[in-house]
Amino acid sequence: MSVTNFFKKAFYLYYDGFRQMTLGRTLWLIIAIKLFIIFVVLKVFFFPNFISNHADKGEEADFVAKEITGRTPQ
């Protein structure tokens, strides 16, 4: 079996499976909405860009290096 034949069979396996879904489409929609909330909404509101707020423009790498090497293990 060649590699391209394997990928072709795998593609058609998933293609046919998704095409015949009824309840699964609703579940995939819920998963997509959850991923959107996790990666977009939470990022915007709860994870501000700390480095850009505390480091000068162009000095971000030095700021990170200083923070990493300057901390002592606990």
Image (cartoon, grey):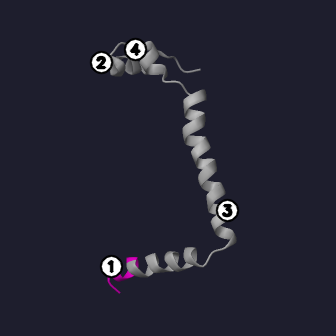
**Mark 1–mark 4 distance (CA, rounded to whole Å):** 49 Å
**First-in-chain label (3 vs 1):** 1
| Drawn side of residue 30 relative to residue 67, left or right | right
Q: What element carries label 3?
A: helix
Residue for point 53% across, 80% down: 16
**First-in-chain label (3 vs 2):** 3
**Mark 4–mark 3 distance (CA, rounded to whole Å):** 43 Å
**Mark 2–mark 4 distance (CA, rounded to whole Å):** 8 Å
Residue for point 55% across, 33% down: 43
Residue 27 numbered tag: 3
Q: Residues within 10 Å of mark 1 (few under 14, many from 20)?
A: few
Q: Which of 73 and 41 is in front in this view?
A: 41
**Mark 2–mark 1 distance (CA, rounded to whole Å):** 45 Å
Residue for point 62% across, 50% down: 33
The magenta segment is 1-7
Mark 3, mark 2: which one is toward the viewer?
3
Question: Contact, CB < 8 Å: mark 3 with mark 2?
Answer: no
Q: Which of 58 and 15 is in front in this view?
A: 15
Say which amino acid is labelled 2. Gly
Q: What element carries label 2?
A: loop
Q: Note whether 32 is above or below 53 in the view shown.
A: below
Q: Where is residue 41 in the image (x, y as percent from the top left)?
A: 59, 36
Q: Is residue 34 magenta?
A: no
Which residue position holds label 4? Answer: 55
**Mark 3–mark 2 distance (CA, rounded to whole Å):** 44 Å
Residue 58 numbered tag: 2
| Drawn side of residue 1 relative to residue 47, left or right | left
Which residue position holds label 1? Answer: 4
